[in-house]
Image (cartoon, rainbow, N blue to C red):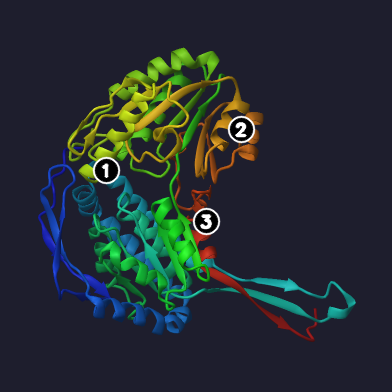
Amino acid sequence: MTSTSAPTPRHWPAWIAGSAWSQGPEAEVTHPGDGSLVGTYSVPDAAAVETAIEAAWSVRKAAQATTAAQRAAALTHVSRRLEERLDEVGALITAENGKPITWSLAEAARAVSTFRLAAEEARRFNGEFQRLDTETSTAGRAAIIRRFPHGPVLGISPFNFPVNLVAHKIAPALAVGAPIVIKPAPATPLGALLLGEILAETDLPAGMFSVLPVGNEIAPSLVDDPRMPVVSFTGSETVGFAIQRAVPHKHVVLELGGNAAAIVLADYSSDADIEWACQRIAMYGNSQGGQTCVSVQRILVEEAIAEKFIARLTQVVRDLPNGSPWEPATVVGPMIHEAAAERVEEWLTEAVDAGATVLVGGKREGTYVEPTLLSNVPTHVRVETEEVFGPVMSVRTIADLDEGIAIVNDSRFGLQTGVFTHDIQKAFRAHRDLEVGGVIIGEAPTFRADQMPYGGIKASGVGREGVRSAMMDLTHERVMVLTDLAL
């Protein structure tokens, strides 16, 4: 693959009730790496926002009445168009987010799959027939149980996956016949606007989708609006739980942060095992500037292999390509803005001042933070207890799996954990005892397939993403009882 160049800047309209909207003020999107102009977009005014919300509320019955075939056709169209425009979508992600182009193209490909999966699930999202004649008093009775949308969905998406995480809001909602209003992150609204452009090519009822690239100051009024009974938010713990407290009467889905751990056990001791674990941990602790909810942050390695493992991991981290996101070899790339990089630098300084040792990295230049590996990190500092959301990992030794489980569980987060082991008994025990939403065996905790349930417990969130899981989350059961049947 040769290096990809930045797309030519263009203007992007907002999407209000399925129609392009280019009135009002414009805002700019700039590249995190060099500050170059990526594009401009129209910022909806209060009247446009009201039109979007009222349209979603008004169309909710028509949206629910669309056929499975109609919804599946629209979702299939989006999937196909994304695939046709894959290089364009990938370049746009890199331009506005700073994600290295290889990762951006992978994200674009995942969005293709997300919409395809939703189209498939829309066709098989069936109800249940249940006999009720299990007692003499209910002879001749049966129930049909179907799921119906809670209502219009407000989707609030983060900057780190500006296309695929928007897809994980839009696709399940449309698959169940729920209107959706998307508020993308102000730093990266263009991916969502591109999806709006493609959705406008479908025959979905007007008002079934809107894309509102508005500032975060508008979010509280959107969250509070009674015409948006479902709020699906992906982002920080602070904001997510503030939403939950503000609207306890609503159906709130939260995909929040974590400080994901990788546990490496002594049976993962061959040269090939250690190489695999080091390569996967280093890459997924630092890729995309470490700006992933399940980026590897803590590494817990069993004492018997610790010396060999840490030496190799240090070298692998040192060798990670960190540079222009337009070069296919680049793994790390810039952070979303300089303030984010400065925060990571501050946390690193705090850890070192408290006694941590820098094995590799530790320096910042502008929005770029070197891939960093720490040891001897005190348990109370922020790089250990909080979500770093940057290219920083810490490593420590453990006596056995029991100690690893105890360390992982001694956290208010619980998103995913990776466990490198060949021992099936230990794999099952980790699955049973780790207080997280997902346990990934033989791989970094960063692994995610778009069809699987994805989400956390404790401070890592409420509810699940993953197309079918999200469809279940956006709907409720409604029972119809039939009487005097010849069962």
Question: Is 401 in front, or is 406?
Answer: 406
Q: Is residue 155 left or right of residue 333?
A: right
Q: Amino acid at mark 1?
A: Ala
Q: Which residue is mark 3?
A: 462
Residue 444, by quadrant, is top left
Give the Cα separation between the discs numbered 3 and 1: 26 Å
N-terminal-most mark, 3 or 2: 2
- Relative to residue 205, is residue 171 depicted above or below? above
Q: Which residue is mark 2?
A: 427
Left or right of 341 on screen, residue 264? right
Q: In the image, which is nearer the foreground, mark 3 or mark 2?
A: 3
Tag 3 secondary structure: strand
Q: Which mark lies nearer to you, 3 or 1?
A: 1
The numbered mark at residue 340 is 1
Name the N-terminal-most of marks 3 and 1: 1
Which structural element holds mark 2? Answer: helix
Q: Which image quarter: residue 368?
A: top left
